[in-house]
Image: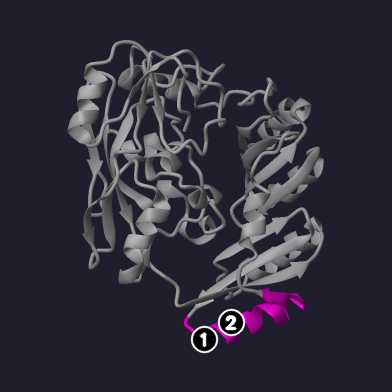
Amino acid sequence: MSDGNATAASLRPTDLRSLRDAVLDTAGTIAIGGAGTAAGWAAPLGPVDATLDTTAMTGVLTHNPGDMTVSVRAGTPLRSLAEELAPHGQHVAFDAARVGDGATVGGLLATADAGPAALVHGSLRDLVIGVTMVLADGTVARSGGHVIKNVAGYDLAKLMHGSYGTLGVLAEVVLRLHPVPKATTTLVVECSLPEAAEHAARVLGGPYEPAALEWTSDGRLLVRVEGTEGALPARVQRVRELLGAGSELDDPWERHAALVRGTDEHAVLRLGVRPSRLPGLLERLPTATVTAGLGTGVATVALAPAAVAEAHALVHEAGGTSALRARPEGSDAPAWGPPPTAVGVLRAVKAELDPQGRFGPGRFDPWM
C-alpha cells in the first residue's frame, strides 16, 4: 500500500491499542502505509493529513499447529511469517511475487494480490478466516477467528480484500495454514498461447492435480507438481506423457515473478475473467508481456500506458475485472475501467464504515 503524502504527519503504532489511539487522535484524512511494495497500485492517493505506518505492528500472536491456524499483526511481512512456520512444516499457501520483496500480510490482503498457487488454494480472501480492524471513528471491529465458521453481519475479511486502505485499518489477521509440500518441481513446455490453452484443458480435465498452471509470453507453460518424494516422479511423468513434451525445472518462478512488475516504459494491469475466455481476451490486448493463470482466469499484463483505457474496456466487455498495478512516472493511465454493476454496494459499504471518507481518498476514483 501507499506510504501517503510526504508532508503528512506520520504515525507508527505498534499494536491494536496504539493503532486505535492513533486513529482517534488524528483529524482529517488518513493513508495506510506498509512495506510500500504496492505504492503505485490503484488510483493515485489524494491529499491526506496523516499516514499510518503499520510496519511496527509485527509478530505472531497465536499459532495453533493442530488447528493449522495462525494469528499475526497486520504489519508482519509474509516471508518472516513463513520462516517462523517452517519448523512446524506449515505455511501460508500463498506465493504472490511481492512476498519476496517484504510485503506485509495486511498489505497483501488490502490489495487482493495472489500468485500461481491460487489455482489450488485461492487468494488471501480464501485463506483469511478472521480480522481485527479499526474503523474511522475508533471502533474496533472483529470478524471470524481461529475456528473456521460463518459469522453474522459483515464478513470483514472479505470486505477488506481489495479495499486498498479505504474502509479501515487492519490490525490483526487470522490465517488458515497448509502443510509444506514434501517435494515440488515444475514441468516447462514451450508453446504458444493457443497451444497452452489446449494443454491446460487436458491437465485440468484429468487426474493430474497441478499445483499451479501458468503461461508466460516468452512462450512457456509452467506446470507445478507437488507430492511426496516417492510419488512425485511418477506424477510428473504422467503429466509429461499427457503433454508430449516438457523439461523439468526446480524453480522457474523467479523469472515468472519478474514479468508481473512494472518497467520505466510500461504500465501493468491485473485482470480476471472466466478462464475459458482468458486466451481469447489476451490475444485482443496490445500487451508487451503476459503471465496468465489458465486455470484461474487471472492474468498480469504489461502494456503501453496509452493502451490501458482500451484494455480496461476489453476486459469489461468480456465480463471481467481489471486494476492498474503500476504506471510509469508521469503517466495518467486510468486505474479502473467502467464501473461494475456492484459499484452501488461499494459506495454503500464505504458510507457505512467510513462515512466521512477519511481513509484512502482517491483510491477508487472515479467510482467513488
Q: How many marks?
A: 2
| Nearer the observer, 360 or 296 | 360
Mark sitting on residue 107: none
For residue 343, side relative to residue 323 (left or right): left
| Residue 155 in view here | no
Residue type beneath disc 1: Ala
Q: How is the image coloured?
A: one colour
For residue 213, side relative to residue 5 (left or right): right
Question: Residue at the left extreme?
Answer: 17
Q: Residue at x 20, y 23 (%)?
A: 21
Residue type beneath disc 2: Arg
| Nearer the observer, 93 or 149 | 93
Q: Residue at x 42, y 39 (%)?
A: 107
Q: Are marks 1 and 2 in contact (CB under 8 Å)?
A: yes
Q: Quadrant of residue 349?
A: top left
- The residue singled out by tag 1 in the image is 231
Q: Position of residue 84 (x, y in %)?
A: 32, 61
Whether residue 274 is in magenta: the answer is: no
| Nearer the observer, 314 or 259 | 259
Q: Position of residue 114 (x, y in %)?
A: 52, 49
Q: Which residues are magenta?
A: 228-248
Q: Quadrant of residue 241?
A: bottom right
- The residue singled out by tag 2 in the image is 235
| Residue 15 in view here | yes
Q: Residue at x 46, y 35 (%)?
A: 162
Determine the secondary structure under disc 2: helix
> Pointer 1: residues within 10 angstroms few (<14), some, or many (20+)?
few
Determine the secondary structure under disc 1: loop
Indicate whether 270 appears above or below 9: below
For residue 100, side relative to residue 189 (left or right): left
Inter-mark Cα distance, 1 to 2: 6 Å
